[in-house]
Image: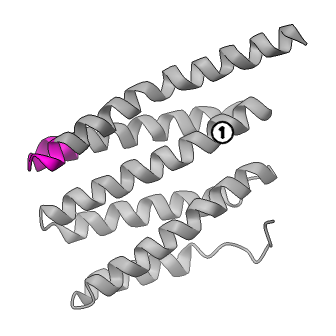
């Protein structure tokens, strides 16, 4: 029992350390955004998104166990937060096409994760997939006067529709 507790604690410490640069970049990006330093915020959020993306990819290729599932459950929202912050920054910069691109990209990533063979990965992905769907709909409503953006959002939502599996 003590051996498995040590393993779990070291795995959790690894995850915490792995996500630390992501968290630091998000915080720095938030500060820059609040100060109106949008280019710096964009760069920090892009770095945070890249870090979350790479971590998620690493854990998805690892042998699935409870610790890996736990890590994936943390990496998915990290990716979503970074992507949405990046989109918000592009909106503030009045670059709606780029904002739409990042919202769609993270949504399509989650759509592919819903098809993962492991139920717990599907479940974690589904939760955030529903949130990104709502965010895309809100984006389309907010910018309804831009038909090219509406078209991109509609394409993203229609091409990412998951199978009709019920996840509990």
Residue drawn where x is 21% and y is 47% of the image: 42
Query: 158 or 121: which is nearer to us?
Result: 121
29 w.r.t. 68: above or below: below
Residue 63: in sight, yes or no? Answer: no
**Screen quadrant of the C terminus:** bottom right
- Read off the residue under disc 1: 60
Residue 98: x and y in percent read: 24, 63
Q: Secondary structure at mark 1?
A: helix
Task: Give the left or right position of residue 66, taking residue 159 as reference.
Answer: right
Residue 84 counted in the magenta span: no
Residue 134: x and y in percent read: 48, 75
What is the tally of numbered marks visible in this picture? 1
**Screen quadrant of the N terminus:** top right
Q: Quadrant of residue 64?
A: top right
50 w.r.t. 144: above or below: above
Q: Tell me the magenta residue range.
A: 32-42
Residue 129: x and y in percent read: 57, 65
Task: Give the left or right position of residue 60, taking residue 50 as reference.
Answer: right
């Amino acid at each position: 029992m003590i051996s498995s507790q040590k393993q779990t604690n070291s795995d959790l410490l690894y995850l915490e350390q792995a996500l630390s640069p992501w968290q630091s970049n998000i915080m720095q990006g938030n500060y820059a955004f609040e100060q109106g330093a949008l280019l710096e915020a964009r760069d920090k959020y892009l770095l945070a998104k890249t870090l979350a993306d790479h971590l998620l990819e690493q854990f998805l290729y690892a042998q699935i166990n409870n610790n890996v599932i736990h890590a994936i459950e943390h990496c998915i929202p990290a990716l979503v937060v970074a992507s949405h912050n990046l989109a918000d920054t592009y909106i503030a910069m009045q670059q709606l096409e780029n904002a739409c691109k990042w919202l769609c990209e993270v949504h399509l990533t989650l759509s592919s994760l819903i098809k993962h063979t492991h139920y717990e990965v599907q479940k974690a992905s589904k939760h955030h997939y529903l949130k990104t769907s709502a965010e895309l709909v809100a984006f389309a409503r907010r910018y309804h006067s831009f038909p090219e953006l509406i078209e991109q959002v509609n394409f993203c939502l229609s091409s990412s529709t998951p199978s009709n599996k019920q996840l509990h």
